[in-house]
Image (spheres, rainbow, N blue to C red):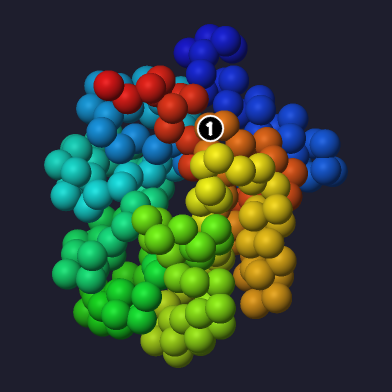
């Protein structure tokens, strides 16, 4: 890939935003969101050294990543979409991180799956930061209790995740998520996508989830 390719461009955007706030260039890990993308679309990013990828659905990821991981065993796979409790065991088996924990029943299902598999993916609690009924995530007021339950269940809680409302300035929502993470002693912040990653990085994101800017608009 050339210096003008999408991957280089996104990496440069992350690094520039980090420098503006005195952070290291690599302070935020780029998760390339490869949902709906075929293996042949993903391969160029793998060949260029990208190793963190995000998928929305367990079943779709099961169909393409085992073969890719045979060739690139150091890939780090993140589940960034909603997870049904009955898919918890499959998610634990496949993913290195799960970003969408949002309810007690899912905490319990994941804890049981982790214990059975003796595998402990990094877990992010998703917060419905804009109180949007159509979005996943626990309510802001419910976060302390859900975190307490997740920790008591033995999950490896790495941080918080959120998607701010699409039609509003994202900075206040990112700032609120960062404050909530600090208040609960969590270092990980999964926030920011193609259009707002600079704002997210400047407000402390440690993971940004980027699809369109890397792969183009979905058909």
Q: Where is residue 164 in the image (x, y as percent from the top left)?
A: 55, 50
Question: What number of labels is visible?
Answer: 1
Between 78 and 105, which is closer to the camera in this rendering? 105
Q: Where is residue 57 in the image (x, y as percent from the top left)?
A: 25, 49
Residue depicted at 56% across the width and 65% down the height: 159
Q: How crowded is mark 1: few (under 14 residues within 10 Å), some or many (20 or more)?
A: some
Depicted 107 relative to depicted 5: above or below: below
Residue depicted at 52% across the width and 13% down the height: 5
> Residue 92 lies in what quarter of the image?
bottom left
> Residue 141 lies in what quarter of the image?
bottom right
Q: Position of residue 137 (x, y in %)?
A: 43, 64
Depicted 174 relative to depicted 158: above or below: above
Instruction: Identify the residue position indicated by label 1 in the image.
Output: 194
Disc 1, SS: loop
Can you see residue 118?
Answer: no
Q: Position of residue 213 (x, y in %)?
A: 49, 25
Can you see residue 69?
Answer: yes
User: Which quadrant would the C terminus be assigned to in this image?
Assistant: top left
């Amino acid at each position: 890939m050339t210096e003008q390719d999408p991957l280089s461009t996104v990496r440069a955007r992350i690094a520039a935003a980090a420098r503006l706030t005195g952070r290291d260039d690599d302070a935020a890990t780029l998760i390339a969101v490869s949902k709906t993308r075929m293996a042949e679309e993903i391969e160029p990013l793998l060949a260029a050294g990208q190793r963190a990828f995000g998928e929305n659905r367990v079943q779709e990821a099961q169909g393409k990543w085992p073969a890719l991981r045979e060739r690139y065993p150091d890939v780090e796979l993140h589940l960034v979409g909603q997870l049904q409790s009955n898919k918890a065991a499959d998610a634990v088996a496949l993913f290195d991180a799960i970003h969408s924990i949002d309810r007690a029943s899912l905490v319990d299902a994941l804890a049981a799956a982790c214990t059975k598999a003796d595998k402990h993916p990094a877990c992010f609690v998703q917060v419905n930061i804009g109180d949007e009924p159509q979005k996943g995530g626990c309510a802001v007021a419910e976060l302390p209790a859900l975190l307490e339950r997740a920790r008591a269940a033995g999950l490896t809680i790495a941080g918080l995740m959120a998607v701010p409302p699409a039609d509003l300035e994202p900075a206040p929502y990112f700032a609120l998520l960062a404050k909530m993470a600090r208040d609960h002693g969590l270092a990980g912040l999964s926030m920011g996508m193609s259009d707002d990653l600079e704002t997210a990085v400047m407000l402390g994101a440690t993971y940004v989830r980027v699809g369109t800017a890397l792969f183009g608009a979905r058909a």
